Every structure is written in C-alpha cells, then in structure tokens.
Image (cartoon, rainbow, N blue to C red):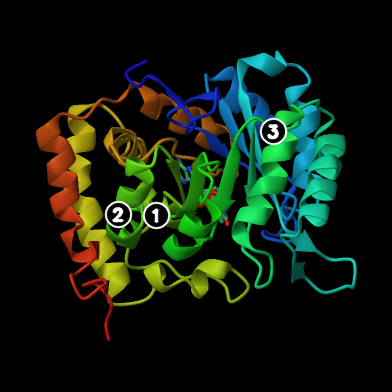
Amino acid sequence: MAHNEVKIGKSDVQATALGLGTNAVGGYNLFPNLKDEDGLELVKTGLNNGIKLLDTAFVYGLGHSEELVGQAMKEFDRHSFALATKGAQDFSTGEQVIDNSPAFLTAQVEASLKRLDTDYIDVYYIHFPDHDTPKAEAVGALERLKEQGKIRAIGLSNFSLAQIKEANADGYVDVVEDEFSLLHQDHAVDMMPYLKENGISFVPYFPLASGLLTGKYDHDVKFPKDDIRSQISDFQEPRYSNALAAIEKVRPIAGEHNASVAQTVLAWYMKNPLISVVIPGAKKASQVEANAKAMDVELSDAEYKAIDDAFVKFQTATSGKSLADPD
Ligand SMILES: NC(=O)c1ccc[n+]([C@@H]2O[C@H](COP(=O)([O-])OP(=O)(O)OC[C@H]3O[C@@H](n4cnc5c(N)ncnc54)[C@H](OP(=O)(O)O)[C@@H]3O)[C@@H](O)[C@H]2O)c1
C-alpha cells in the first residue's frame, strides 16, 4: 500500500488515508431506492479491502445508517478499524433543530453507541453548529465523554473558521470534516492552514463531487428533477464544462498508473499535505473495491501539480470567489 496509516489529530485513533463515506448505507432520507443488503455489503467490502475508517452519522437515515454499519462491522475485529459518527440534530418536535448543548450531545453519543452496538466511537463529530451553545462548552461535553472512554477523538463538521477557533479554545478538537474537493478548494485558504498549525486533522467530504470527478459523465448527461444532482452547481454551466475539461487532463495521468480517473483523483487527496483521510461514498460494492485500490496509487510531485494546475479555475481567487463561478 503506497499510503501510510494516519493518526487523527492529537488522539490515538489510527486510520487509513482512505475511508468509506456511508451516507448511502441506510440513508433513505438522502437517496432514493437504497436497499439494506446493499448497504451492509458496502461496509463489508470496505473493511475487506483494507479501509480502516467508516464515516456515518445519525442523520443518514435518522439512525438507520448507524444500525446497518453496526450490523456489518460485527464480522470484523472492532479494534482493526476506526468508526466515526456525528450528531446534533433533534427531531423530537417533528422538525429538525440543531442542538449542541452538553446534555443533548451526551444523550446523542449514548444513542449512537446503542445503534452502532459498540462500546466506543473512535471519532464523534458535532455535525452542525447551533446558535446558542458556547462552542467550548459543547466540546467540553465531548471531552468528558472522551475521559469516560465512550469516544476517542473530538470532531467538528460544518463549522466556520471563527467557530472552530472558539470551539478549540482548550485545544480539545482533533478533526474537522467539511466540503472540499478539486472543485471546491476555498478551505485550502480559509481554514486548512489553521488546522495544520494546530494539529487538527482535516477530512474532506464530497471528494468525488457526487460522482462528477470520477470522469463518468459527459456533456449529454441529464438528471431527473428528483435527483439532487439536477440542482448541484457543479452540474450547471459554466462550471460543468470547466469541470469536464479539467477531468480530461487527469485521464493521461490515470493511464500512466493503469488507474481510473476516480482512483487518481483520490490519490491526489491522499498526497495533499493538508488532508488527513478522504472518505468517498459509494452506491455499489464494486465502487468501494475500486476506490480502495486508490491507496496503491502514488502520484509523483509533477503529477500532483499537473492535477492542481488542471483545476486552477476552481482554486480560490484572492477575492475569495471561485474563478469558475459565473457571477
Ligand atoms: N459532514 C457532513 O456534513 C457531510 C456531508 C456530506 C457527506 N458527508 C460524508 O462524506 C461522504 C462522501 O460524500 P458523498 O458520498 O455524498 O459524495 P462523493 O464521495 O463526492 O461521491 C460519492 C458518489 O460518487 C459515485 N461513485 C463513487 N465511487 C465511484 C466510482 N469508483 N466510480 C463511479 N462512481 C462512483 C457514487 O454515486 P453514483 O453511483 O450515484 O454516481 C457515490 O455515491 C459521505 O458518504 C458522508 O459520509 C459528510
């Protein structure tokens, strides 16, 4: 394997540089037509192919993703991989309310442990910030759960840099998960340098831009209205054509490695010094198996830079605006 194991923040949690995103494992509220047996197979295929970080959340299927992940991982040695989950959403009133209060987060961790049917969670993320709870108080609640051995590392997701700094006042934050891809590089400028300087790992989500960065789409693609991709800006012009043109420049590099475009893009994240673990999602076990093989692809410095250059249109301009945005 070309890519070494990584350590999450200041914790003892070890993982592979490539994990598995499981929002399509039981995430019936996010994707249509998901089958439980396919979800179980995705997780088992990941663990059987050397992936050592599973990324789930309460909100993926409102607990169902956690239940399926917990069921699938029963066949494996619990200490041989890391398990990450997230919480902060309260649906008890029928509507979603984000709650980071210590009491709510503590109850959420207990509920996740039950659904996952495990004694500990390796990484627990506050999935979204709320308006009211002082950030260091929310993280303090997770620190107490860490002392009790119920979680092993503390994460934040979808927090701004200012919120991360506030949350990390006592230095307890181990990892941040946020959107980042070759098409969305803002955080390389506004967030990731602070994380690196403070020993906080970064986990990018949507690394394949919902499949676009696998190189499987062309100009003729049309998504039905109920497919989220019909609304995602990456699939709208002029971003879409710019993305397809950039992806064409990855193809010859992939060819040099006998790899797919998806594997080559994933290898780019694994070589990026600001990134800790990349967590592509999947709908089919064959995708998981193929993505796991990206751990064998090692890009040269020149190839890494060539991919960087291909996506220069999507890199953050000094104005803070992506050059590929139309307005
Ligand atoms: N913290 C947060 O707020 C947050 C938000 C979003 C996601 N996440 C996490 O990040 C993970 C990744 O995000 P994501 O899964 O939504 O997006 P993604 O990783 O950018 O794209 C995954 C999708 O690309 C397609 N794909 C994957 N591998 C492929 C391959 N080898 N060949 C062809 N197509 C392939 C599959 O969709 P199709 O087969 O349908 O094309 C798959 O579902 C999630 O699973 C979740 O764990 C976290």
* Residue where numbered disc 3 is placed: 146
Is there a contact, CB below 8 Å, between mark 1 and mark 3? no
Where residue 134 appears, as percent x and y from the top left, is 64, 63
Closer to the camera in the image, 205 or 105: 105
Closer to the camera in the image, 92 or 141: 141
Badge 1 element? loop
**Image quarter of residue 123:** top right
User: Looking at the picture, does residue 78 appear above or below residue 285?
Assistant: above
Quarter of the rendering occupied by the N terminus: top left
* Residue where numbered disc 2 is placed: 188
Closer to the camera in the image, 223 or 84: 84
* Residue where numbered disc 1 is placed: 180
Tell me which label, 1 or 3, sits earlier in the chain: 3
Give, as a three-letter code, the residue at label 1. Answer: Phe
Tell whether circle 2 marks a residue whose Cβ is less than 8 angstroms from ligand 1: no
Where residue 222 appears, as percent x and y from the top left, is 46, 70
